[in-house]
Structure formats: C-alpha cells, structure tokens
Amino acid sequence: MEGEKYYLGFDFSTQQIKLIAVDDNLKVVFEGHVKFDTDLPEFGTSGGACVHDDKVTVTAPAAMWVKALDMLLDQMKSEGFDFSKVAGISGDGQQHGSVYWKKGARNVLGNMQPDKSMYEQLKDCFSLKDSPIWQDASTGSQIIQLQDAIGGAMELARLTGSRGFERYTGTQIMKIYQTNREAYDNTERISLISSFAASLFMGDYAPIDFGDGSGMNLLDIRNKVWASKCLEACGPCLGDKLGEPVPSKTVVGNVSSYMSRKYGFPSTCKVVAFTGDNMCSLAGLAPRKGDIMVSLGSSDDVFILLNGAKARLSGHVFIDATDTLPFVGLICFKNGSLTRENVMNRCAGSWKKFDEMLLKTPPGNNGNIGIYFDKKEIQPVAMGTFRFNENDERVESFPPEVEVRAVLEGQFLARLMYAKLCGLQIGPESRVIATGGASANQAILQIIADIFNTSVYITDVPNSAALGGCYRAKHALMPEGTPYSEVVKGLPEPTCACKHTPGLEKVYMPMLERYKKLEEKVAAM
Ligand code: XUL
C-alpha cells in the first residue's frame, strides 16, 4: 500500500463500541462510537447488559453487537472516513463473554452481500441469542465441578492462571451444555467477544488469542494450548468448537469482500487478532518493564508485567498481548473510589478538607489500621469495616483524622500485598503509573509512593483500549521481531507526580506484615 496508512482499533466494551483510527505516526485521525442503550434501545439493555430475573444471570444479545458495528461503519462512511487507507484493524472485547454461532453460520458469514446489512444477514446465526457476559455470576456449581475435575482451585490456577471465577468462559460453556443442550449441540463455533468481533471483519471465524484465551479457565497458559482436562470437564467436542488459539499478534486474515465492497477497505487490509479489553487497554498505556499500573476507579485494578506465572488463589494471570513480558498479572479490588468517597463524606465533607485532615496524622497512622469493605471484596471474600489499634485490637471507631488516613493506607497496603503475592518485585527500574479519576489527588498519590516505596507517575489516556487496538494492529504489520516498545516509542511519557519519602519503608514494611495478619483475621471472621 502506497501513501498514508491508517490503523483502526475497535473496543467492543460493555456499554458501547468505540473506534479510534490513527495514522502511521499514531496520531488520532478519527473517532466514533455507538452506545448500546441509547443508539439501539430496541434491545432493551441497561449499561449494555440484561440482568435476568434470578439477578445473577447477565447476558447481552449477540445480534446487538452486529447491528452496532453496522451503525458505526455506516456513520464513518457518511462522515467521509477514507477506508481505502486502512492497512490494519485490531481491537478488543469485554473479557470472558462468549458468542455461540449455530451450524451453518460460517457459510453465511463468508458470503455476506454488501446490499444488505450484517445484522440482516447474521441475526439468525446464533444458537444462543443471549451471550453470557463478564457480569454473570450464575455458575457457582459449575466452578465446583471444574475445580474438582482438575484437582482443586490451586491446580486450576496453576494451569490456567486463575482459580474458578463465575464469569470465566469455561464454566459459562459448561452451564450452557448442562442447561441448554440443544443450543450447545447446535453450535459449530464458540467465539469470545473479541474473536467474534474480528470474525465480523474477516467474514470467517477468527481464532481466539492467547491474551483473552487466558480468561476462560481453559487455556494452559504456559504451553499455550487448550488444557484437555478442562475442555473435557466443560463440554463434549469443545476443542473443535473453540478452534486453535493463536498469539495475540497474529494476522488472522484479510478483511472480507463484504467489507471491501461495502465500505472500500483495500482487499489487502489485515485483521489482527482481537484480545481482551484489559490487555488491550494495557497496550494503549504502553507500559515498560518494571511498571506497576494502578487504575483508581470505582474498582481499583493493579496490573503488573511478569516474567513467570505463580499459582495463586487471588488475582489473574493472562498472557501479555504485546509480548513485552510473557505474562500480565491483574488484581481487581471491588472497593476503590466509592469506599474512599464514603469515608471522605463521613469524616471530611470535601476532598480539600480530607487532604488537610490527612496531614494531622503521621505516615503509619500511629499504628492504627483500617480495612474498609463496603462491598463484598474479591480478595479476601469479606465485607464490613474493621478497625485495629496499634496493639492489633479491634476497635469500634477512629477519630476522623485517623479514619481518613486509615482508608488510604489500608487500601494501598492491600494493593501492594496482593501485587507481591502475584510476583511483583520492586527494583530501581520500578515506577507506579496511576490512572483513573483518583489519580488527580496528590495526597493519594503520595501515600501510594510511600507504601510502594517508588515514584508515582500519572498518565491520562482516554480510550486506552481502542488505542491499544490501533497500536497492536500496527505492531503486527511491522517486520517480525520488532518489539512493541518500538511501535509506541514516540508517545508522550507519563509524568512524575511524586517521589517516595526516603525512610518510610521502615514504617510501611512492618505495617505490611501486620496488615497481612489482620486481613487474614478479617477473612476468618
Ligand atoms: C476482567 C473483567 C472485566 C471485563 C470488562 O476480568 O471481568 O474487566 O473485562 O471490562
């Protein structure tokens, strides 16, 4: 292809499809989105999802995603986007969700006619109209069955990177096999939402990539093949229905003739494997080795790049989609900003006052430790507020200035403790990169720096998942062996927001040990 080239990144997230197009210098040249609830109200979703009567089954209609992509591409066309410049497409999907293509669907997918929409042609191609998504929590009994078949939760974590989780695809598939045998038998291919999205561009079944494949409890993450014991436990002939998984950097095919004829993509335009939203978002943030990504949102997420995968019952290990290091560790904490905000409202009334009150107590809070789980926490599985004095005795309340420090210190000691359990080693190269709403709060950043004993940087990359899709598309089209860092080298660097206070490790390291014991106590309560 001569002249200017574009790379497209599509983020099939829970609430919308977001698209970003960049040029060869990674400059954003076009953005678009379709929001499911408001742009496609006929599907009746709320936040892109349908919660069933039992409250734990959560699905989204697969046909809605097809219609949304039609709408987005039509919108790009009508706004004059020049599809002929697109050299590569990649993207991501909300993790764990699965799409069930019925027998004969491959044929329809490969022979779509440009005078009709994809929706018209594909809407009846799904053996299960409602795809389970990551918010589903209905597979408790299947988790027990899968873990029993593999030899326990720890063995499942060793093999696949995570113990059984309700949203993980393997047990979702097992549930469909057990409760809707007809749909299972009538399915010729099971895609993840990511590989389903890539399939729409290719006009054929795109393979599942290693990154998103690691969120299924089905992939042997060290040998990068389906774990046969897991497949057997979840459903008959499952390997055939899933197809072979591939590295995330794989060019899975060219765009379909439908895409070229209808929108004017060059027939040589490459489709690069789509991956999970978390891995793609990480690709958009372009971390370097040694970075600890701390996303401070309604939940807090900690991502670390790892050389090896340790088996643990908390957190998740995924295969890295950028090949910067072999693995990515992800630990998700349900009690993030909202919990901090509750304490702020109760004790200070404003963030300004909260910051002032924080200065009234020294780092280490004179030995007081608080654990605040307003919502049922993921690790440990516990709920409630637990306050301990310097003698590790449980107390009913703290003075307000102690409470404001306790919520932050408790939360970030937990983040550090679980990151270490996941394999985090802090060295001279390490830095914390903070993102998300609360990364604007300097006092919070200082506590993170002091607890992690390293500098904290901030970066603001809206739509990092869609951008990660663009960068990954470009990466896959570069000569074999080009490191990902080469693709993203021109991007703005995160800025240093604060340095750690020398000497405070003497306060926080013993406190981390105490926190660990107190949390164990809380988990056993
Ligand atoms: C990760 C997870 C969510 C979804 C939706 O394990 O379930 O982050 O990927 O964003």
Image (tube, helix red, strand yellow):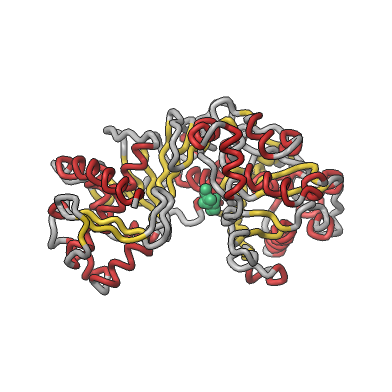
Q: Which residue is drawn at 75% across and 57% down?
A: 129
Q: Which residue is drawn at 58% across and 36% down?
A: 148
Quarter of the image for the N terminus: give it.
top right
Residue 49 horizontal side relative to residue 394, left or right: right
Q: Which residue lies furthest to the front in this view?
A: 525
One can see residue 27 in this view: no
Q: Position of residue 250 (x, y in %)?
A: 64, 34
Looking at the rendering, which quadrant does residue 136 occupy? bottom right
Residue 500 horizontal side relative to residue 148, left or right: left
Q: Position of residue 346 (x, y in %)?
A: 27, 72
94 or 168: nearer the viewer: 168
Q: Which residue is drawn at 26% across and 74% down?
A: 349
Q: How many labels does the image show?
A: 0
Vertical position of residue 261 compared to residue 220: above or below: below
One can see residue 480 in this view: yes
Looking at the rendering, which quadrant does residue 144 occupy? top right
Q: Where is residue 5 in the image (x, y as percent from the top left)?
A: 63, 44
Vertical position of residue 119 compared to residue 232: above or below: below
